[in-house]
Image (spheres, helix red, strand yellow):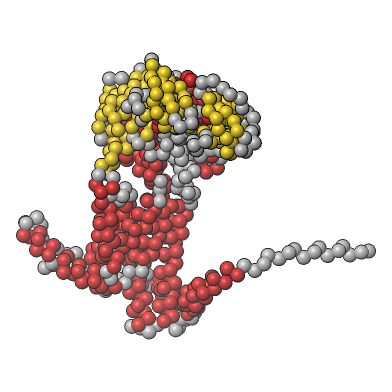
């Protein structure tokens, strides 16, 4: 019996040398992200004492550890919702090019250039018990009681909003201006009032972008550290998860527990991001133009 | 919001923009006309002539700098577009990319708060009119250019607007589809029985579709007339050039009696019909290439001797360029193809030589 003739080898695609351009980025990711992540993951399963899950058991049974998840969520979620919620209408108004657009955009974006510490310094002066705000309110007899907007929950929340807003605003502005304004004009000729134009045209087309923006802003807010220390009450109401990790690593020198806390932090972020991106899948995600250009 | 009307009156409609150096320039200057129910009006002109500005002003997408627009006795130029209820077809269609064909077409009805079952019926009817039945659930991105174009038309007409506004709706289609859709647009206009204003830079489209053509240049109306008149009797040289009068020659006026003008130049004598008054000394004649006949013998009146300079074969006929001894070039549509360098004579009937003031 004759063996069937071997099929001629499929002509191989010539190696695309353009792919080599991805090597530096891949190396960077491997060395500075994947490796430390895997190292931390392994470390979290090799506790100083007890079984391989001892760190995680400790986290979820210790009274000053597991509540930090809620503390952080209680700061990060409202800050993100407020930022996206305020940035959306302002960015929507800024979609029309005007003399003012550039100035307003510039002013709104300035806080991104300030460091968290600088914002904290400013807030202590402005919102503190003897700050300008308190003095002004007492001067015009609008509110006589004590002003407590620093060294507590509100101080951290305000600082997260100030530092996170420009980011959310810029991101949403780029999504808004990417939508062909002729769509809203078409809707208006079909009887849609300005609010209906926003609701039926802009909002559905922006939804995927808003979800993306929410995720990025949330991850940023969830890893809050400096402002929670400087403007909050790091021993109590604003003891966020990154403070717990910091204490484990640099005060108790328990790198293994710190790694476990970092893993839990990452997992919570992943959970929220996955939920939001899951919602995003329910919306139209194609190009946002209305036909041939 | 009205669905029917008897006339739309534009009075001195003007739109100025801030131009270079703070100088305001009028993109649309003093457009005055009355559009009656049932009419198909084409706004015709080269790009930048103000035709799209006029359409946007009527739709309410652009505020007027002057003048007024009235639908019967109702003044509408102060109303926002959503209160005018005119259907508009945009050049790039402007379909809502996240809505199905059905949702796109039904959008205007839903905005008017019409109940769902009626929306469904009317959408189905509109889609039948543009022959898109069966495509209801597709997204615009899944349709071809021609289908998107028809969705845009269905979306504009389903609200039963008194006026349908179309901004170069065929410019993104290929030549064959353009001619097919042209006939379709004319049919839909007849079925609706209201009025259509159609912006185009293509004189063939304007001639074939419109009841009346508004020829524009630099924001100013040059002529408002039925296609036959715009084609045969252009009001001025701009219109003539735009309508295909490719031969424009400046000559001396020799004699003028009862609208007939005898003109002369170094190597030609022409008699033509006065269309626009001039200074009585010099005048321009405008002649269409297809009005000139090519011969070789001696002719009578309006015969010019020339030499063949260029021949472009176009299938059914040829485009022949001839040059007179002193270098005046004439474009001629000829059924025969003479050889380059041949000495020929060309002849044009008196009534097809249009004379415009210098």
Q: Is residue A165 found left or right of A150 in the rendered image?
A: right
Rendered location of residue B99, percent (x, y): 47, 40
Tell me the quadrant of the picture where the N terminus of chain B can be found: top left
- At 41% from the left and 81% from the top, the residue drawn is A255
- At 48% from the left and 42% from the top, the residue drawn is A291
Rendered location of residue A207, percent (x, y): 41, 50
Nearest the viewer among A19 and B241 is B241
Q: Residue furthest right?
A: A1
Q: In this view, does A210 lie above or below A121?
A: above
**Residue B127 shows up from this direction:** no
Rendered location of residue B203, percent (x, y): 48, 30
Nearest the viewer among A134 and B238 is B238
Tell me the quadrant of the picture where the C terminus of chain B can be found: top left
- At 29% from the left and 37% from the top, the residue drawn is B26
Q: Is residue A247 found left or right of A33 in the rendered image?
A: left
The quadrant in which residue B108 appears is top left
- Count of numbered circles on the image: 0
Q: Is residue A116 found left or right of B52 in the rendered image?
A: left
The quadrant in which residue A137 appears is bottom left
Nearest the viewer among B141 and B313 is B313
- At 25% from the left and 73% from the top, the residue drawn is A117
Rendered location of residue B215, percent (x, y): 40, 29
The quadrant in which residue B143 appears is top right
Q: Is residue B270 found left or right of B175 in the rendered image?
A: left
**Residue A158 shows up from this direction:** yes
């Amino acid at each position: 019996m004759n063996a069937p003739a071997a099929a001629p080898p499929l002509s191989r695609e010539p190696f695309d040398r353009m792919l080599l351009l991805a090597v530096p980025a891949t190396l960077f990711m491997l060395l500075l992200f994947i490796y430390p992540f895997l190292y931390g993951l392994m470390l979290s399963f090799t506790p100083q004492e007890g079984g391989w899950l001892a760190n995680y058991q400790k986290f979820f049974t210790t009274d000053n550890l597991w509540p930090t998840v809620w503390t952080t969520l209680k700061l990060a979620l409202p800050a993100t919702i407020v930022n996206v919620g305020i940035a959306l209408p302002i960015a929507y108004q800024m979609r029309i090019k005007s003399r003012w657009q550039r100035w307003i955009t510039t002013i709104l974006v300035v806080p991104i250039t300030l460091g968290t510490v600088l914002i904290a310094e400013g807030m202590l002066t402005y919102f503190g018990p003897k700050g300008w705000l308190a003095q002004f309110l007492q001067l015009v007899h609008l509110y006589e009681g004590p002003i407590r907007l620093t060294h507590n929950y509100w101080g951290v929340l305000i600082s997260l909003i100030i530092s996170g807003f420009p980011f959310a605003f810029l991101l949403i502005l780029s999504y808004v201006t990417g939508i062909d304004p002729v769509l809203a004009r078409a809707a208006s000729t079909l009887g849609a009032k300005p609010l209906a134009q926003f609701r039926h045209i802009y909002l559905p087309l922006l939804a995927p972008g808003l979800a993306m923006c929410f995720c990025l802003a949330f991850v940023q807010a969830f890893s809050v550290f400096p402002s929670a220390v400087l403007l909050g009450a790091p021993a109590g109401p604003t003891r966020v998860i990154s403070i717990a990790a910091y204490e484990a690593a640099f005060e108790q020198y328990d790198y293994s527990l710190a790694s476990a806390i970092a893993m839990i932090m990452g997992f919570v972020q992943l959970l929220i991001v996955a939920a939001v991106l899951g919602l995003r899948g329910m919306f139209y995600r194609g190009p946002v133009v209305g036909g041939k250009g | 919001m009205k669905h029917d009307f008897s006339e739309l009156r534009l009075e001195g409609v003007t739109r100025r923009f801030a131009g270079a150096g703070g100088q305001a320039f009028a993109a649309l200057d003093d457009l005055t006309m009355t559009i009656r129910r049932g009419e198909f009006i084409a706004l015709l002109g080269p790009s930048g002539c103000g035709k799209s500005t006029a359409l946007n002003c009527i739709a309410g997408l652009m505020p007027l700098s002057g003048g007024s627009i009235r639908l019967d006795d109702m003044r509408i130029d102060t109303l926002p577009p959503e209160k005018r209820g005119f259907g508009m077809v945009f050049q790039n269609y402007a379909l809502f990319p996240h809505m199905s064909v059905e949702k796109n077409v039904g959008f205007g009805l839903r905005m008017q708060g019409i109940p769902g079952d009626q929306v469904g019926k009317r959408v189905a009817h509109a889609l039948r009119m543009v022959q898109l039945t069966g495509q209801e659930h597709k997204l615009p991105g899944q349709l071809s250019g021609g289908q998107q174009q028809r969705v845009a038309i269905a979306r504009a007409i389903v609200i039963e607007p008194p006026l349908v506004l179309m901004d170069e709706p065929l410019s993104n289609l290929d030549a064959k589809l353009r001619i097919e859709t042209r006939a379709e647009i004319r049919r839909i206009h007849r079925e609706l029985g209201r009025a259509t204003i159609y912006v185009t830079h293509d004189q063939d489209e304007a001639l074939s579709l419109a009841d009346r053509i508004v020829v524009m240049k630099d924001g100013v109306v040059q002529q408002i007339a039925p296609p036959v008149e715009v084609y045969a009797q252009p009001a001025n040289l701009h219109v003539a050039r735009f309508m295909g009068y490719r031969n424009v020659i400046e000559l001396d006026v020799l004699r003028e009696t009862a609208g007939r003008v005898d003109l002369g130049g170094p190597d030609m004598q022409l008699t033509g019909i006065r269309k626009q008054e001039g200074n009585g000394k010099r005048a321009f004649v405008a002649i269409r290439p297809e009005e000139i006949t090519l011969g070789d013998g001696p002719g009578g009146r309006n015969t010019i001797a020339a030499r063949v300079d260029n021949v472009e074969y176009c299938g059914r006929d040829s485009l022949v360029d001839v040059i007179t001894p002193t270098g005046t070039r004439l474009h001629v549509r000829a059924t025969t193809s003479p050889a380059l360098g041949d000495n020929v004579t060309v002849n044009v009937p008196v009534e097809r030589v249009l004379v415009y003031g210098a």
